[in-house]
Image (spheres, rainbow, N blue to C red):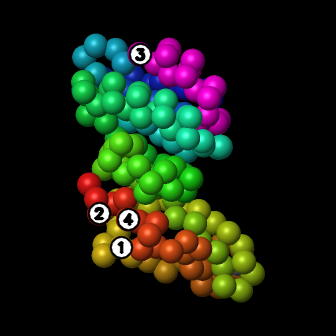
Amino acid sequence: MRIKETKQGKTLAVELSGDLDESTEKAFAKLVVPPGTDSVTFDLTGLRKINSIGIRHFINVLGRIASKSALQLVNCPATYVDYCNLLTKTLHAELVESFEIPYACDACQFESRPMFERSMITDGQSPQKMSCLKCGADAQPSVDLTRYLEFLSLS
Ligand SMILES: [Zn+2]
């Protein structure tokens, strides 16, 4: 896994890319939050495979940082959301600001994963109708939304 840190004023942006697995312990050990950082944002766009060992390392990192700075998680992939539903409290699911929802087209089965902001979700429903990027027909969530979005209501 690769970690890219960008400091802007009192905010630190941390981009994770690659696999969140047993190899991540070393990468996280090098992650240092500079003194005077008020807020840390993890961008998970580039994450690929995620396993429970990687999640355990990430929980440690989140705990370490959350005690000192405000923290948020953006662009969380669907596999990460699955872990949020399993480990809502330990994984600090309340810090998730934006995340994918998997969609599939009714007509051609084309799959897409648009990103949603937490504030766009009301009553456990995705906010708008999606059209297939390939053929334009209606696309529907390919997950059970009530279960998939459960992590949002428990914060
Ligand atoms: Zn289609």
Q: Which residue is drawn at 43% across and 57% down?
A: 85
The residue at which mark 4 appears reads as 150
Report the residue at 38% width, 36% height from top.
Answer: 41
Disc nearer the start of the sequence (3/1): 3
Q: Where is residue 19 in the image (x, y as percent from the top left)?
A: 64, 36
The CA span between labels 3 and 4 is 32 Å
Q: Are marks 1 and 2 in contact (CB under 8 Å)?
A: yes
**Mark 1 vs ligand 1: CB below 8 Å:** no
The image shows residue 91 at horizontal and vertical percentages of 39, 43
Q: Gap in Å between the C-alphas at discs 3 and 1?
A: 36 Å
Task: Name the spot of residue 54 as percent of width and height, x first.
Answer: 55, 34
Disc number for residue 153: 2
Q: In which quarter of the image is residue 155?
A: bottom left
**Labels 1 and 4: the sequence-earlier one:** 1
Callout 1: helix, strand or loop? loop
Tag 2: Cα neighbours inside 10 Å, few (<14), some, or many (≥20)? few
Circles 1 and 4: CB atoms closer than 8 Å: no
| Neighbours of disc 4 within 10 Å: few (<14), some (14-19), many (20+) | some
**Residue where numbered disc 3 is placed:** 32
Earlier along the polypeptide chain: callout 1 or callout 2? 1
Amino acid type shown at disc 2: Ser
The residue beneath circle 1 is 124
How far apart marks 2 and 3 lie (CA) works out to 31 Å
